[in-house]
Structure formats: structure tokens, C-alpha cells
């Protein structure tokens, strides 16, 4: 049997296609196949769904001012507090070390509106910068000074609360919002709030010591806040049902829903315990501890995870036990 050459085969196929009914109906074109499947809309084939367009990450732009007065500026592109301060410093042509702390939606020294690890996407940021420096001499006549310390996450520890009737409440030159720059001429810039609180707790009684403080620069209508005798229900909250930008010490910032009612209640209880046991308030730290408890089934497991993730705080055993009890009560479960 003789085999036709490829050239003749192609010619014969072309002639068959030309005279075929399919060729006449479709104008002489054959259905095309892509990846072994018929092209969309031909021969009854089901069209492939189009690929969804790539998701474009929205630009998060925040408005900011210097708390004592300035034009409004816009900042974006930060993932933690240090980068946030750097962005604010850049737009106002100051050093980032000049910023003591930031408040949300108020220019006043209001510790209820202190910027922590979360910012509502519609929040307005006010930066409080260094004002006058002052030195005060304090004599410790009892165990506790009555100060609650926090820090800005960028190396600056400051006074968040002064207990009424305490030693420090009787020193009129000391105010909420004052940054603690040195203790007895020993600089504490760069120390965390729990380190500063520990130093103050360990100061001996009946022996005077000196605090070098830096107060935030104030406008004429900003009144110094001396004490906080009670806690407002809005303390530390960004707002319910709103999205927030969660700032992290490591990794990228994420957009999250505002904390649930349980998370807020549990975090507030932990914040109270932090103040009671360690003399600090840190709602972001308290919120992080709530997150840790979600993955734990026992107080022993919780203690191990705290030591692994937050060992630098050296939490007392009594504190860890109290925290676990508080979380269990918030969840409505037995210990």
C-alpha cells in the first residue's frame, strides 16, 4: 500500500473541510481548542470563569497635627509605633525623639485617648512633643509612690496615672503625661515602663531621690491632668464595630475589626492587674495576653506561653494565676 506524503494529506484535508457543512456554516473556520478544551461559547462548552482582578491594598492615610498647634498633615506607610513617629517627625521637620506620645481625636493630655497598638481608620492623630524640663525631689515615706507608668513603644516612659492621696499626688509639680527622663541623674531613656516602675518600687524609704521630668508642650487651653480616680468605660477603646489598623512590634500592620466585648472586658481586667502587681498600665500588652489565653487550656499552659513570649516582664506567679482566673470569669467558664 502506498502512503501519501504529508503535503498531499494536508491538501486533501483542506478540500474536505472546504466542502463540509461545518465549514460552510462557520465560514470555513474550525473550532479552536485551548488546553484541550473547546473555546468559550462553541460546541456547547461551558465558558471558563474569568480570573478575578488582583486585590489592590487600599492606601491608609491618616491626618495628624502637633497637639500644641500646627497645620494638618497626612502620613502613611508605617507598620509600628516607631515608624509612625518617624513619619510624623518627617512631615513636621522635627526629630522623632521629640515625640513623647500620641492621642487619638483630642489634642489634650487625655490618657483615655492614648494611642496604643490600634488606630481606627478614621482616627485623627495628635502628637505631643517635648516641652519644659523640670526636676523634683521626692522622699518615699511608704511602699508605693502612687504612680502608674506606661511607655510610648519607642523608648519613652511617662506617667499615665497619679493615685489620689498618694505621695506623688502631694508633689504639685508632677503631672499625668510627664515623661520620666532620669532617676537620680541616671538616664532611663530607652527603658520599658515595667523597668522604670521596678526602679521606683525599689527606691529606699526615708531617702530623698530626684526625678527629671519632661512635660508635654501645651497650648493655652490644655489643662494638666493630675489624677484619675476612676476609669471611664471608653478607656483605651477605639470604637465598636469599626476597622482598626493593628500595629505590631514585628511584622506588618494588619487591618482588623475592633475588639469584641469579651476581649475588651478581659483586657481591661488584665490592665487593672498589671497596675496592681507591677505599677504599669499597657492596654496593648493586656490585649496581647488575651490573645495568648485563647490558645491555652490550663493555667500551666498559659504560664509557659507567657514565659516564652513575654518572659522579659518576669511576671509574678500570683499575677499569672490572677490573670487566668480573670479570663475564665470573662468567658463564663470554670477554671
Image (cartoon, helix red, strand yellow):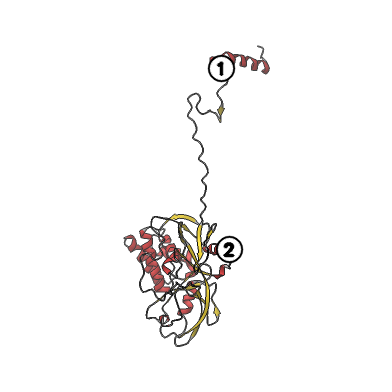
Residue 172 at least partly seen: yes
Q: Is residue 223 left or right of residue 188?
A: left
Marks 2 and 1 in Cβ contact (< 8 Å): no
Task: Please rate how many residues cluster around mark 1, counting C-alpha atoms within 10 Å: few if below 14, some from 14 to 19, many from 20.
Answer: some
Q: Vertical placement of 158 versus 170: above or below?
A: above
Which residue is depicted at the point 51% across and 25% down?
42
* Distance between mark 2 and mark 1 Cα atoms: 70 Å
- Number of disc labels: 2
User: Quick one: SS at disc 2?
Assistant: helix
In this orientation, which residue lies closer to the viewer: 234 or 219? 219
Report the residue marked by disc 1: 23
Between disc 2 and disc 1, the foreground one is 2
Task: Please rate how many residues cluster around mark 2, counting C-alpha atoms within 10 Å: few if below 14, some from 14 to 19, many from 20.
Answer: few
User: Quick one: SS at disc 1?
Assistant: helix
Q: Mark 2 or 1 closer to N-term? A: 1
Q: Vertical placement of 13 versus 204: above or below?
A: above
**Which label is found at residue 225?**
none
In this orientation, which residue lies closer to the viewer: 311 or 113? 113
Where residue 328 sits: x, y (%)?
34, 62
Where residue 322 sits: x, y (%)?
37, 69
Residue 308 at least partly seen: no
**Which label is found at residue 90?**
2
Which residue is depicted at the point 42% across and 86% down?
141
Specify the quadrant that holds the C terminus.
bottom left
Amino acid at each position: 500500500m502506498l502512503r501519501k506524503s504529508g503535503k498531499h494529506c494536508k491538501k486533501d484535508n483542506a478540500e474536505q473541510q472546504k466542502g463540509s457543512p461545518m465549514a460552510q456554516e462557520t465560514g470555513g473556520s474550525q473550532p479552536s481548542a485551548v488546553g484541550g478544551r473547546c473555546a468559550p461559547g462553541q460546541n456547547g462548552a461551558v465558558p471558563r470563569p474569568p480570573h478575578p482582578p488582583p486585590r489592590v491594598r487600599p492606601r491608609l492615610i491618616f491626618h495628624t497635627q502637633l497637639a500644641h498647634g500646627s497645620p494638618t498633615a497626612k502620613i502613611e506607610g508605617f507598620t509600628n509605633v516607631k515608624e509612625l513617629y518617624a513619619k510624623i517627625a518627617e512631615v513636621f521637620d522635627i526629630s522623632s525623639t521629640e515625640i513623647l506620645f500620641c492621642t487619638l481625636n483630642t489634642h489634650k493630655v487625655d490618657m483615655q485617648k492614648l494611642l496604643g497598638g490600634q488606630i481606627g481608620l478614621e482616627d485623627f492623630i495628635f502628637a505631643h512633643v517635648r516641652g519644659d524640663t523640670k526636676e523634683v525631689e521626692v522622699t518615699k515615706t511608704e511602699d508605693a509612690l502612687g504612680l502608674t507608668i506606661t511607655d510610648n513603644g519607642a523608648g519613652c516612659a511617662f506617667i499615665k496615672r497619679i493615685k489620689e492621696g498618694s505621695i506623688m499626688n502631694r508633689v504639685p509639680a508632677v503631672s499625668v503625661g510627664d515623661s520620666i527622663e532620669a532617676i537620680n541623674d541616671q538616664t532611663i531613656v530607652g527603658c520599658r515602663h515595667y523597668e522604670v516602675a521596678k526602679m521606683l518600687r525599689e527606691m529606699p524609704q526615708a531617702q530623698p531621690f530626684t526625678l527629671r521630668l519632661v512635660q508635654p508642650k501645651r497650648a493655652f487651653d490644655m489643662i494638666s491632668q493630675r489624677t484619675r480616680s476612676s476609669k471611664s468605660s471608653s478607656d483605651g477603646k477605639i470604637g465598636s464595630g469599626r476597622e482598626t489598623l493593628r500595629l505590631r512590634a514585628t511584622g506588618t500592620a494588619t487591618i482588623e475589626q475592633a475588639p469584641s466585648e469579651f476581649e475588651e472586658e478581659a483586657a481591661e481586667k488584665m490592665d487593672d492587674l498589671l497596675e496592681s502587681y507591677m505599677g504599669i498600665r499597657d492596654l496593648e500588652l493586656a490585649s496581647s495576653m488575651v490573645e495568648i489565653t485563647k490558645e491555652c487550656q490550663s493555667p500551666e499552659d498559659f504560664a509557659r506561653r507567657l514565659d516564652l513570649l513575654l518572659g522579659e516582664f518576669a511576671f509574678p506567679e500570683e499575677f499569672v494565676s490572677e490573670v487566668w482566673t480573670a479570663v475564665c470569669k470573662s468567658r463564663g467558664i470554670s477554671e
